[in-house]
Image: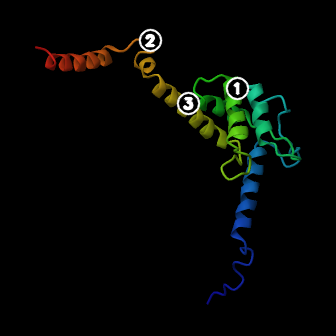
Amino acid sequence: MNDRSGEGVNDRSPKESQIKESHLEESQQSRLGLSGHESQKPRFAAGTSAVGCKQYPQLREALADYMQGEGEERVYPRGRHVVDVMDAAEGATEQQVIDCLRYLRDERGLKPGGRSGPRHFSWFPTVVGDYFRQKRERQAAANPTASSDSSSGRLSETVFNSMTEAIEINGSHGGA
């Protein structure tokens, strides 16, 4: 017969255990490629990023500003996080994305650690992408002719024909 009375002694707080595992995982990821004797500080200085990623230095600073709580240490996003945010903005300029971040934090009140606010930099691509998608949808709804044929600012032939067809049908009933 197996005696299991000693099992589960360390599992008194599953939430605490998950938090410790999460911190261990993050710490392991940040030290990839580092031996146990090297510094655990980030590999890149505050103004640099990983080689190969396109650089958006102002956005990187804005993201670090967003996540920095009062009295907390400044943390910078990885280069890929910054690029993911720009990619999610689908063609917006770096300044437009920074303006979006200001809106989210100052106008919407989405503060770090808050109920709907960011806890990690991975929050930003989804929220920034949603912001710009909704903005485009509102603009298209406000100006439907521009979305019909945006290159010339004119209605497409299909839209024009459907509109004139309705007029012709109505016009033929009101005649002599």
Relative vertical location of residue 94 with respect to residue 38 in this rendering, above or below: above
Relative vertical location of residue 110 with respect to residue 144 in this rendering, above or below: below
Write down the residue under mark 3.
Answer: 135
Amino acid type of the residue tagged 1 in the rendering: Gly
Residue lying at 59% horizontally and 32% vertically, measured from the top left: 88
Which sits in the foreground, 73 or 42?
A: 73
Q: Quadrant of the N terminus?
A: bottom right
The location of residue 114, given as percent across then percent down, is 71, 51
Is residue 95 left or right of 149 when viewed as pictured? right
Rounded to the nearest whole Å, what is the CA distance between mark 2 and mark 3? 20 Å
The location of residue 165, given as percent across then percent down, is 22, 18
Which quadrant of the view contains residue 164?
top left
The location of residue 160, given as percent across then percent down, is 31, 15
Which sits in the foreground, 44 or 1?
A: 44
Write down the residue under mark 2.
Answer: 153
Amino acid type of the residue tagged 3 in the rendering: Lys
Is residue 165 left or right of 69 when viewed as pictured? left
Are dots 2 and 3 in contact, CB under 8 Å?
no
Q: Quadrant of the C terminus?
A: top left
Residue lying at 72% horizontally and 53% vertically, measured from the top left: 25
- SS category of the residue bearing label 2: loop
Q: Which mark is residue 170?
A: none
Question: Counting residues from the N terminus, which is met first, the one under dot 2 or under dot 1?
Answer: 1
Which quadrant of the view contains residue 129?
top right
Question: Counting residues from the N terminus, which is met first, the one under dot 2 or under dot 3?
Answer: 3
Write down the residue under mark 1.
Answer: 52
Amino acid type of the residue tagged 2 in the rendering: Gly
- SS category of the residue bearing label 1: loop
Are dots 3 and 1 in contact, CB under 8 Å?
no
